[in-house]
Image (cartoon, rainbow, N blue to C red):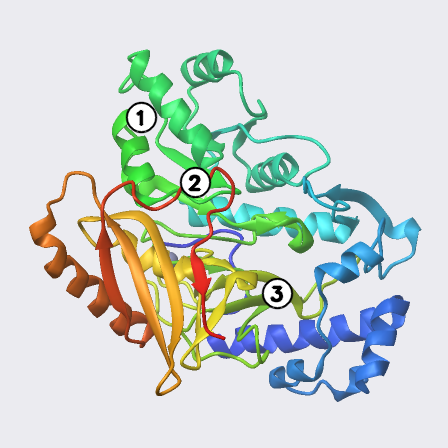
Amino acid sequence: MERTFDTTAKTEKELQALQLEGLKWTVNHVYNGSEIYRNKFDEKGVKPGDIKVLDDIRKLPFTTSTDLKDGYPFPLRSVPFEKVVRIHASSGTTGKRKVLCYSAKDVDDWAEMFARCYSYADCTAEDRIQIAVGYGVWTAGWGFQNGCERFGAMSIPIGPGNTDMQCQFLEDFGTTVLCCTASMGLLMAEEIDQRGLKGKIALRKMIFGSERASDAMRTRISELSGVSFDQLFDIPGMTELYGPGTGLDCRYHRGIHYWADYYILEILNPDTLEPVQPGEVGEMVVTTLKKEAAPLIRYRTRDLTRLIPEVCPCGSIMPMHDRILGRSDDMFIYKAVNIYPSHIDQILSNIKGVGSEYQIVLFRKEERGKDHMTLRVERLHDSHHHEDKHLGKAVEHAIKKQILVSCDVEIVDHGSLPRSERKTKRVFDNRD
Ligand code: ZN
């Protein structure tokens, strides 16, 4: 199926050529436009002219959230103020907000990227898109709105909340696509069900921004709302990188296609900052290729994911990454393997009979100095003791297969592990 707003590259080779061109442009641009970047480059002893092939990206210095804080209120600005047409800020609660500048071209590029998202979600100009995300200084509303207008569908810029009005609009305007957070998607699905609107309204798609829906949540949303399961999409995005709209999972849901003609995604070992093997979990590090006002050079997002080194049945040459699997700050090292609690979380969620609560206990046996890992996992409330042994083996096997380390598994009673309303402590490292 022909997609609108798709990349001009027809092959992977052409895509790489676009990337190299964008990378060369970006390093020149930041070196000449930003004192902060120029100093970083000089400290590393790298000049824009040193970037000759894509792999040369590894010569470039990293950027972190500290750079954003230090540069507050207009960090990483690489154009004069007369070129800045807008700012956006994150809704961050701790420390100072992340504020990013946008040039007219940045705003335009972002709309193009977002229009591509609607296209990958198989929307058409006939669609009526109800945008139920926040409009304000943050990126959500503006992203969905400008993308929709660029795409050419009808936008209904309602904003979040107010379920009465949401339902009224669904009925009166014949809304076909609803954009919101996954939580609100669930709330709306419940309303649609309770009001007996299922089958009476034209809603056929939902696009979720900012938080990802679990499969269980999607199933529930689909059942209650009547929107088919494969028509529920996720849009990732962060303020530092334009905002939402930098990728989308297509109808096959094999992973999130990301717009590699606008940014380079490296997946690095957060410890060594070397690339991991394709398919291995690591930290997302992004470098923009067209951004003018606040470009990113090897920006460490601290988000963990992995590349999905497959070709999607949809035929797109846009590469895919997995859902966000957690934060690199939570990583621990066991037997020279980097392990993320969120990865264990994900493995457990695919095993029938275990609950969502678990603890990881690390200790060292005196006599040999060897490290051990014990995983305490709660059994589901309706499972039985006599299945424990079988269940323990299943967990052990899954961990071995997916993380490549051995561990002991202890199945414990449902409700026996402590719960916390704040972040639950999961890793107990008793080595040393
Ligand atoms: Zn696809």
Residue 90 visible in image: yes
Q: Amino acid at mark 1?
A: Ser
| Residue carrying label 2 | 123
Note whether 86 is above or below 263 in the view shown: above
Q: Is residue 414 left or right of residue 317?
A: left
How far from the left and from the top, in percent, is residue 408?
Answer: 25, 68
Disc tally is: 3
Residue 283 rendering spot, x and y as whole percentages: 54, 67
Residue identifier under label 1 = 225
Q: In which quadrant of the rendered view does residue 370 lie? A: bottom left
Name which quarter of the figure residue 361 lies in. Answer: bottom left
Is tag 2's residue or tag 3's residue first in the polypeptide sequence? 2
Question: Front-most of 298 and 21?
Answer: 298
- The amino acid sitting under disc 3 is Tyr
Which residue sits at x=91%, y=51%?
81
Label pair 2/3, CB-CB below 8 angstroms:
no
At numbered mark 3, what does the secondary structure look like: helix, strand or loop? strand
Q: Is residue 45 above or below residue 396?
A: below
Q: Is residue 322 visible?
A: no
Left or right: 77, with 234 as reference point: right
* Ligand 1 occupies quarter: bottom left
Q: Position of residue 287 (x, y in %)?
A: 66, 68
- The residue indicated by pointer 3 is 263
- Indicate the position of residue 49 as horizontal and vertical percent values: 79, 86
In the picture, the quarter occupied by the N terminus is bottom left
